[in-house]
Amino acid sequence: MFDASPVGRVVFIAWLFLPAVVLLLGTALLDRCRQVRVRRFWCDTARQVVRVVFVDSTVRACSAFEPARAVTCGRECLNTGRQPTRHAA
């Protein structure tokens, strides 16, 4: 039924691990495709210049909060329908 030779065993083991390898490679490629952007602009809600980290179309961090990842505002920078005005560094 199965080839008992060493080559047959290697092929069988390779077929067992192939789905895991494909999933790991797919996950790694998707993580690399994420678009990370950092913007500095005036935030009307915080009334200060903020540095915001956007991943895809999500706010991941904002300098107006401590810690920066604990963003609790309404994220108006996403809801305005326009790109935030960049502030000179």
Image: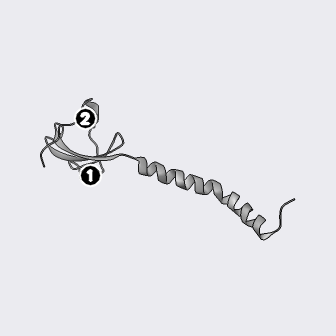
Q: Which residue is mark 1?
A: 68
Taking 56 as reference, is 51 left or right?
left
Q: Which residue is mark 2?
A: 76
Taking 1 as reference, is 89 left or right?
left
In the rendered image, residue 10, in percent from the top left (x then y), is placed at 72, 66
Q: Residue at x 42, y 47 (%)?
A: 33
Q: Residue at x 83, y 63 (%)?
A: 3
Name the quarter where the N terminus is drawn.
Answer: bottom right
Q: Amino acid at mark 1?
A: Ala
Question: Which residue sits furthest bottom?
Answer: 6
In the image, is residue 87 above or below residue 7?
A: above
Q: Amino acid at mark 2?
A: Glu
In the image, is residue 78 above or below residue 23?
A: above
In the rendered image, residue 14, in percent from the top left (x then y), is placed at 68, 61
Q: Label 2 neighbourhood size at 10 Å, few (<14), some (14-19), many (20+)? A: few
The coloring applied to the image is one colour
Question: Which residue sits furthest top?
Answer: 81
In the rendered image, residue 86, in percent from the top left (x then y), is placed at 17, 41
* Picture quadrant where residue 49 is located: top left
Taking 39 as reference, is 4 left or right?
right
Taking 31 as reference, is 52 left or right?
left
Q: Determine whether the residue tagged by mark 2 lies in a helix, strand or loop.
A: helix
Question: Which residue sits furthest right?
Answer: 1
Q: Nearer the viewer, residue 64 or 41?
A: 41
Q: Label 1 neighbourhood size at 10 Å, few (<14), some (14-19), many (20+)? A: some
Q: How many marks?
A: 2
Pointer 1 or 2: first along the chain: 1
* Picture quadrant where residue 6 is located: bottom right
Q: Residue at x 40, y 47 (%)?
A: 34
Are the two marked residues, 1 and 2, in contact with CB atoms closer than 8 angstroms? Answer: no
Q: Determine whether the residue tagged by mark 1 lies in a helix, strand or loop.
A: loop
